[in-house]
Image (spheres, coloured by chain):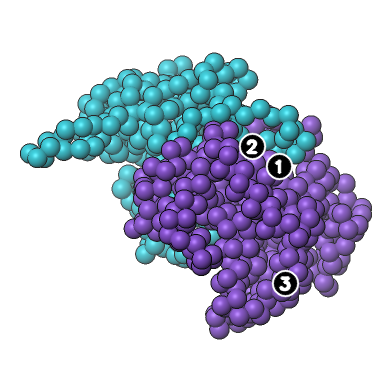
Chain colours: A cyan, B purple
Amino acid sequence: MSPILEVEGLTKSFVKKRNIFGLPAERTHAVKDVSFTLEKGRTRAIVGESGAGKSTVGRMVLRLAVPDQGSVSLFGDNILDMSASQARKLRHRATMIFQDPFNSLDPRMLIGESVAEPLVLHTSLNRGERGQKVAELLERVGLRKDQIEKYPHEFSGGQLQRIAIARALATEPELIVCDEPVAALDVSIQAQVLNLLQDLQSERQISYLFISHDLALVKMFAHDVTVMRRGEIVESGTTEQIFDDPQETYTKELLSAIPVMSPRRRASRKTVAAPSA
Amino acid sequence: MVEHTNEAGNTALLDAAEEAAEHIGLGETVLEVRDLCVDFNTPHGWSRVVDNVNLTLNRGETLGLVGESGSGKTVTSLAVMGLLTGPRVKVTGSVKLAGQELIGLPAREMNRLRGRSIGMIFQEPRRCLNPAFTVGDQIAEVVRRHRTDTTRKDAWARAVEMLDLVGIPEPDKRAHDYPHQFSGGMCQRVMLAMALACEPVVLIADEPTTALDVTVQAQVLTLLTELQGRMGLGVLFITHDLGVVAETCDRVAVLYGGQVMEMTDAEGLFYDPQHPYTEGLLASTPDAQVRAERLHAIPGTVPPPWNWPSGCRFNPRCTYAQAGRCDQGAIVLGGPADHLVRCVRADELRLEGITE
């Protein structure tokens, strides 16, 4: 089976300093030579500390940021060779869910309108069909029909994130880039959202690129893991390989820093000292 | 990281800390909260956000306050610090710090205690620091505020000493830096230095590591535990992360809807939870040690304080709830003193904790 997403040698730098002519004098590498693949119906997690370049990779995969070098092949086509309008047409097959649902939904649009917006842009459904589809979607993520005509501020964080998922699902995508989708939610709600994502994956064979800093969560949720640090890949492998037999010191440091859910094991735990930030 | 400390300087500092709190022995109660209630005047009328909370904190002990957002953790800590004032809030009950009643204390008196006998660190350290002053100035300010006879020079020296204590390399140089020159973890160390500068007996830590990366979180927690042991601090640790609780707390109070649902030592809570809410929280926290296929989700959300259900406040979300028993009357916090639980079915339920 050929992968639906293939990333090869992705590199992106941002200008850090400019000289007196306004030309770049110094650059920082946000992402350096990142390559990975993602197969249909699987989840690849990208983990790392803040500043590791995880989100930049996620954005480049959907061409929300343009890399300096490298290639991104989505469903077999290199999206970097496409014109902007061609790339936009792919956005119904590959969508994104962001960390903060309070800021990713328009506060002045009814949630029914927000969820219907991708349908207006990417499909030829008429108003009635759209309304029906929106109702179906919201029901699928566990919201009631009468909540369609409400504004984002009337919902809790977990509900909003489920609405954001409904919106991302509207065009029946094959790939969803999830950028820290549950980091802003309470644990009990976090489980609701993750279980929903898992159910959708088994129902519709959706692939997830799952960006997260929470390793315990990644262990449960992902099939493959890529560990990043300072823009570069440290280690990549299946979840079992990374968690049970990490090869790199940095991966071991990350794993040993996860709080252990067991007070009795507290004393026996050894901390691998991480370098200071 | 933590090993990096200037031994001679720190010993003197810690001696002073021990001396200051010598009249309270290790293991004795430093903070006693009795029947604490907080009411807010909301558009829905007066709502009770914290409902009859009782807590005791001993010297050298870490007491965890756990719960979801909206459970009253932070409001409890703000009430203890005397930071809830104004016409729209009512605080009743009793808060005793080393035997001294804090509720009803005049603002002037409270200002003298706050930062001196009781310190606090918050979730977002960078927001709590003034971006326009160097960190050294900010720590020195605290010292001079509470020890009026300290000279500027001594206060500055003290600031450098504190930065050294919290493990900031080259403290004499870094004291001249501004908050934006520090990373998030380093900012939290600076906050800790500031909170501990006057050798308080109680430290309130409100989600101190939530905004930090895991590796940095581990460093800050290790530092906090180490300093606590050396200074004999009583720490009230507020968090929503049970993993962090397992790493740091001696005893834990689980809050829901402004009430204590369960209170016991950390082992009892993790291995033998008695309240369905605790069981739900434990099951919904991902554990890197166990390979689970699926997380347990607690259905529903925390209701707002003007809309608490009658009976047990958790009953609409509880899988064990029984009509007629759980949804009426006031449910009391009962059971043996070392394992309190607020559940009418506590005796008949066999709940699952963490297995080793």
Using a 10 Å C-alpha cutoff, classify the residue at mark 1 as few (fewer than 14 neighbours), some (14 to 19) or many (20 or more): many
Residue A42: percent from left, percent from top? 51, 27
Please name the residue that numbered disc 1 is placed on: B246
Label 3 amino acid?
Gln
Q: Going 64% across and 53% down the picture, which residue do you hit?
A: B17
Mark 2 or mark 3: which is in front? 3
| Distance Cα–Cα, label 2 vs label 3 | 36 Å
The residue labelled by disc 3 is: B100
- What amino acid is labelled 1 in the image? Ala
Kindly report which numbered mark, 1 or 3, lies closer to the viewer in this rendering. 3
Q: Nearer the viewer, residue B293 or B206?
A: B206
In the rendered view, does A67 fall on the left or right side of B117? Answer: left
Pinpoint the chain carrying mark 1. B
* Quadrant for the C terminus of chain A in the image: top left
Kindly check if marks 1 and 2 are in contact, taking CB atoms under 8 A apart as contact. yes
Which residue is rendered at x = 39% and y = 50% of the image? B179
How far apart are the alpha carbons under marks 1 and 3? 31 Å
Q: Answer left or right for B181 relative to B212.
A: left
Badge 2 local density, few (<14 within 10 Å), some, or many (20+)?
Answer: many
Residue, disc 2: A259
Instruction: Please identify the residue farthest to the left as the structure is shown.
Output: A21
